[in-house]
Amino acid sequence: MADGRQTAGKRRGVTRRQLLRGLSALGGAGAAYMGLRALGLLGVGRALAQGAETTAPLPAGSLAGKRVVVIGAGLAGLCAALRLVRAGAEVEILEATDRVGGRSLTLRQGDSYREWDWNSPTTMRFEAVGDVPADDPGNYLNAGPGRIPQHHARVIDYCRELGVPLQPFIFYDAANLVQNDAWNGGRPVQLRRLKHDLRGHLAELLAKVRDQGALDRVLDPAEAEAFLGMLQQFGQLSAEGSELVYKGAATLGYPRAGYRIEPGSVAQPGQPWPTLSLEEILQSDLWAGEMFNNLEYDWQATLLEPVGGMDRIVEGFRRAPLGDQRVLGDLVLTGQPVTAIELEGGKATVVTPDGPRPPADYVVATLASTLIARLEGNFLSPPLRQVLAGVDFTPACKVGWQARRRFWEEDDRIYGGISWTKDIISQVWYPSYGFNGPTGVLTGAYNRHADAEEFGRLSRAERLERALEGGEKLHPGFRDEVFAGNGVSIAWARMPYQVGGWADDTFLTQPEVFAAMADADPLGGRVFLAGDWFSHWPGWQVGSLDSAHLATDGIHRRAAGRG
């Protein structure tokens, strides 16, 4: 159909519906959401809670005379305990392992841990490189959580309150690499090449929509012209007669997809990357996730991380003053796995291998739901025990390497962000700090679901070998660029008193289980549940803090006779 053809006396243009379909194809739900906002089809929405609202304490003295046992010294347990003790309660924190923090585990020089089926511990070892000693504060691996989204206000505000400094976490660098064995001969390409060439091809397709006669809600002609002008800029389209076509990211000004050889002096014009065809991009299969991960709500810029390691948040809670010469960490008893909870006479008794603890008015249980379901005692009905036992958890694994040099910066000009591969390692993270330094710590694998299940079954040596092979696919020579003998791996489904990385988005994947689980709080009026699994943010620290506030608010209402 010729450009500008009239149908039934009206010029056909691009509908808002068609525009949103195009945006969704390009960038997923995140792009479509932004399109709705731009078209004024979404409300403003409720502002995020900030400051004192997110970290508000319980009324001082409101729990005086009450005894509460908190099971678990992870982030949920620590936050719950801090609110309770500051409200006047007598609080005891029982931790099964020999450390606080739960899955918020940051490994530094000499730190060690065990998986449940390993007789000997894994020990984190760094090497001195240049003027950076092995125990340098920048030498650490976040073996658990590694980033904080900007909308996780409760985490960020607690960091402010606890004096935990934050810095940017770089999730996306356009120079990050994507790789698939089944495409491009297994050679990685920069994300910017795939994204900009796909944007150009899609913009060309959208520009041709006006000629197809199948548009059901037209834009005003002036709007249509403005829309086409936007597409020309959006996709670097060139006019070819009456059509707008994509001839490659290098056709208008500086190439958005970058250079194979960078330009320099007047004698060095540079050489842009060749254009990837739409067919090549679709064959890559990298559009199925890797290309658009930075559009996900949880991963949109700006993300943050604590300076010096994610466990600085845990340390902030541990050192929180209680007003009587004590700090919160003084309330933690380590090496105290709970085996049972008994309810009797309006009290709850928590039992450990050392015997029953003194009866408590309330209990906050922050164990994973499946571990709570395994506890003995009369605090759970058989149906509820079955519900908690039925929550699905996602296995997750990480690998850490120290680099002999910052080869990703020197060779590939990558400064932070994540490279993605279809290999079992899934991802390689580059540090967001220490630029141009002599060394750095890489997350050399971060996988989940079936890949993590398979990876976790391997021996330590086999995991590290697979991670070296995966790293080689993104960075040839990877094995020689890291201290291969010092690598560490962790499988969270195999860690003592853990069952995986996080609950598998229960509210989405198991809505009936989630609803029944939510209705179960409090248990017998005495046992309150907490943990990221007991929230809409499983796997995120904000879920732990949100659930801690829910539990402690519930205890306060119950103690006041309102719950």
Image (cartoon, rainbow, N blue to C red):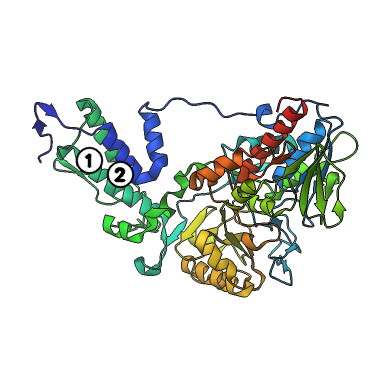
Judge whether residue 277 can be spotted in this image.
yes
Task: Determine which residue is flagged by label 2.
Answer: 235
Q: Amino acid at mark 1?
A: Ala
Task: Determine which residue is flagged by label 1.
Answer: 207
- Does residue 200 appear to the left or right of 12 in the view shown? right
Q: Is residue 183 above or below residue 290?
A: below
Residue placed at 37% from the left, 32% from the top? 36
**Depth order, front residue of 5/250:** 5
How far is mark 1 from mark 2, CA to CA?
A: 10 Å
SS state under label 1: helix
- Does residue 22 appear to the left or right of 496 in the view shown? left
Residue placed at 22% from the left, 25% from the top? 220
Label 1: few (<14), some (14–19) or many (≥20) C-alpha neighbours in 10 Å: many
Q: Give how far across and how far down residue 251 sits, in percent.
A: 28, 49
Q: Amino acid at mark 2?
A: Gly
Q: Give how far across and how far down residue 377 sits, in percent.
A: 75, 50
> Which numbered disc covers residue 556?
none
Q: Which quadrant holds residue 363?
A: top right
Mark 1 vs 2, N-terminal side: 1
Q: Give how far across and how far down residue 553 sits, in percent.
A: 70, 31
Q: Which quadrant holds residue 452?
A: bottom right
Which quarter shows the N terminus?
top left
**Depth order, front residue of 552/467:** 552
Q: Is residue 525 above or below residue 432?
A: above
- Does residue 170 appear to the left or right of 224 in the view shown? right
Residue placed at 71% from the left, 50% from the top? 311
Label 2: few (<14), some (14–19) or many (≥20) C-alpha neighbours in 10 Å: many
> Badges 1 and 2: C-beta atoms under 8 Å apart?
yes
Q: Is residue 340 above or below residue 52?
A: below
**Depth order, front residue of 137/286:** 286
